[in-house]
Amino acid sequence: RVGVNKQSLDALWPRINEAPFSSARARMTTMHRHTHRDSASADHIMLCTKGAPERVAPICDTMQCDGAVVAIDRVRVLHQAETMAAAGMRVLAVATRALEKLPESAEHAERELTLLALVGLIDPPRAKAKAAIATCQAAGIHVVMITGDHPATALAIAVRLGIADANDVAMTGREIPTLSDADLAQRIRDVRVFARVAPEDKLRIVKALQSCGEYVAMTGDGVNDAPALKRANIGIAMGRGGTDVAREAAHMVLLDDDFATIVKAVHEGRRIYDNIRRFVRFVLSTNAGEIITLFLAPLLGLPLPLLPIHILWMNLVTDGLPGITLAAEPAEPDSMQRPPRSPQESLLAGGLWQQALRVGVLMAALALGTQALWLRNGNSHWQTMTFTVLTLAQLAHLMAIRSDRTSIWALGVRGNPALLVAVVVAFGLQMTTLYVPAMTRIFHTEPLTVTELAVCIGISSIVLWAVELEKWILRRRIRMAHDAW
């Protein structure tokens, strides 16, 4: 935009040597020779240095100011760099030196330079980043910034994104080597920004967080990030800007390099895990209900309530397809407001197996109660009604456990169409075992009257009301605890 053509400059001043950038030096130097003059002539070898102002200013003797070269005012230069960094800019100092002859190396010639300018680069955060970080924090995920930028730059960006507060202080790469592992682990919980960090420091930060019991996800794109990515519990490499080494070391590759995508992955992961727990809870409760019914009936002096084909039918119709549709259940509304679960937590934690057992006992009680009552009345349909009550109770339970807290009336029926279809189909198939002659012969069932069927539906719905009551009590306890807090 200002009329400078890099290709023409490369042809006029080809690079003949360089001192590459390193995190220890925090600067890079290149040397160039003018192609149209005698290489031995003075002022026709140029040395150019760029890097962190605090690393470039000390090797400068002069600076360019208002078109003139004057003695450098390092205090003024560094103060200006701090001011730019505090505004969220990444600041580079650019300096040069004319050489009369070729030195041993570019690094040896890094002295007596003339500072040309401070360059401020603005790399604005993505629009979604701030909202994504806020979502992470609400979900109990602590976001930490690790960067090679100036501390003031890092803090300014971190405050803008909501990672840190205005009163927070960044820990620098100079401090980290001076701390023992124990001291670093003690201080690291309160640090949200690490600046001017060397690659080896990233690995120590990850280890220190893990030693505090944290589950660490680390993002990175460079070769130097590979050890930290590999050490982290979840290493996340950048798919677009990342190196092959980083992608190989990581556990996951982010194809769009967008932090918001990580948050979406966390949200989806919580949904999947919740649905796995629901499926396990459903299968445990239904099987418990069947086993308890078969086990207790003889002990109570009742005839065998179910035939083997009835059990196979329930396992196929109610435990099969309807149970699988729980995988399509949307995430809970508060799934990203809950703290992360412990990695050591069992799948059955949080009272899951107790809930499953309670519902299983309730199903068995309803089935055995139906059997005993209709046997007592001399009704020949007692086995068919017991079979129907247990089958419909399992479908009622399936509808009730779509959410751990939210009422089924608040969820509605549109959230998981697959589950609704599966329940309707399962109910229809159950009706065929009662009213289709070929099916009644296979299942040894008898058609129920409208009253008997209504009684079966009413008794089985008790499971739904019981689970809803349990969720209401849980919501009430949470609300009372929140009000007390």
Image (cartoon, rainbow, N blue to C red):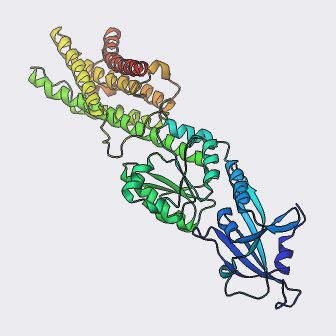
Q: Is residue 375 left or right of residue 401?
A: left
Relative to 210, 411 lies left or right: right
The answer to which quarter of the image holds residue 160 is top right
x and y percentages locating residue 180 in the rendered image: 39, 60
In which quadrant of the rendered image does the C terminus lie?
Answer: top left
Q: Position of residue 371 (x, y in %)?
A: 20, 17
| Residue 135, quarter of picture | top right
Residue 112 at x, y percent in the picture:
73, 76
Q: How many marks?
A: 0
Is residue 215 in view from this perspective? Answer: no
Residue nearest the viewer, comparing 159 with 422? 159
Q: Is residue 421 above or below residue 273?
A: above
Vertical comparison of 82 with 277: above or below: below
Work out which quarter of the rendered image holds the N terminus and state it. Answer: bottom right
Side (left or right) of 290 relative to 464: left
Q: Residue at x 61, y 50 (%)?
A: 258
